[in-house]
Amino acid sequence: MDNVTTAPNSSSLQISLFILMGLPGIHEWQHWLSLPLALLYLLALVANLLIVITIHREPMLHEPMYHFLGILALVDIGLATTIMPKIMAIFWFDAKAISLPECFAQMYVIHYFIFMESGIFLCMAVDRYIAICHPLRYPSILTEAFMIKVTGFMVLRNGLLTIPVPVLAAQRLYCSKNEINHCLCSNLGVISLACDDITVNKFYQLCLAWILVGSDMALVFSSYALILRNVLRLNSAEAMSKALSTCSSHLILICFFYTGVIVLSVTHLVKEKIPLIPVLLNVLHNVIPPALNPMVYALRMRELRLGFQRLLGWVKDCPQSNLSLKGHVDVRKKDVVALNRPEFKKLKTHGQ
């Protein structure tokens, strides 16, 4: 192939380009998948931009939960935009070549945004835990300064720990094959072409996944387990319903995201037998969540839905009180305080 440098001692030379072959096994008709993927990408862009603009324009949505939701929307836009233009170029224009620096840059950005999404889900889970289990302390804990610190920590954590992934990949020697059976520059797909040892790369990839995604997932589900335990102790059916309702949208997306990560990891075990499955799931996992997240939040959150309607002019004179987050604070403070005070329980016992 033209893009491979050949010489009598090819092991001492480095290739200059990678070739992204697309979806393995279906190269002849993979262009038919371009239309649904393009529609998903456009949906992700429009819906997430709508969320960001709505949260920015509506003063009543300037709350910690919507702050995290706005960051998640920006992360989804970044993740989808990192991979979809190149995939569309491969499917539509057969533009399969990608330089090594571009490939390593894409590798870094993909990892960064995936880890960032996991981190934001953790922040949202902690936000719900404090709002439901410690409602009186919620305003004093989740202050603006706290939000800036948490966001900055997630940006630095994911940004710094992800740097070694492309750096280690760039240090490998690529001297023979340059065809990647993928639509994007995945770390494992790229380093599998290396002529030298890739043990360090695989080890760091595994450690990074366990340290970031694994710990985030454990803390997220621990938070929701504590929320569920606290909610089940409530004697008020109305308070219980509010608590479960406000957590449902978060839990749906969190389960979808982490289930996708686990399934994607497991399918790599059968990559040799059915190479299409992990590649297709990898692409879908980077496109479907950005398109799905805004729809779930729009359907489940009344305040955000009303904000959409106001932004689009569907509701001309919607009073600001309808968008107040005080009605959304997952369980009303007075309900939680009253139901958990020892005095309340004593009074109830004496009354009986």
Image: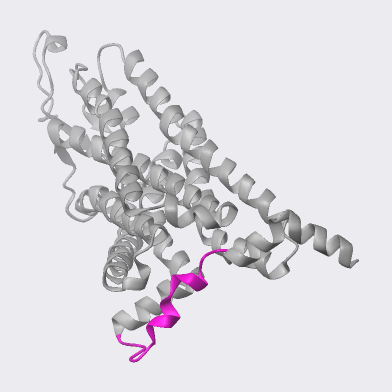
Count of labels in the image? 0
Can I make out residue 117 in this image? yes
Give the position of the N terminus as an image quadrant.
Answer: top left
Please tell me which residue is depicted at 30% across the width and 58% down the height of the picture.
34
User: Magenta residues, as a range?
Assistant: 313-330
Where's residue 80, x and y in %? 29, 53
Nearer the observer, 104 or 124 = 124
Give the main secondary structure of the magenta stretch. loop
Q: Is residue 72 magenta?
A: no
Q: Is residue 318 magenta?
A: yes
Q: Is residue 223 left or right of residue 284?
A: right
Please tell me which residue is depicted at 75% across the width and 62% down the height of the picture.
235
Where's residue 6, x and y in %? 10, 18
Give the position of the C terminus as an image quadrant.
Answer: bottom right
Nearer the observer, 65 or 37 = 65
166 over 182 or under it: above or below = above
229 over 271 or under it: above or below = below
Can I make out residue 274 in this image? no
Please tell me which residue is depicted at 35% across the width and 58% down the height of the picture.
67
Where's residue 219, x and y in %? 52, 38
Please tell me which residue is depicted at 29% across the width and 23% down the height of the picture.
191
Where's residue 112, x and y in %? 29, 39
234 over 189 or under it: above or below = below
Nearer the observer, 227 or 139 = 139
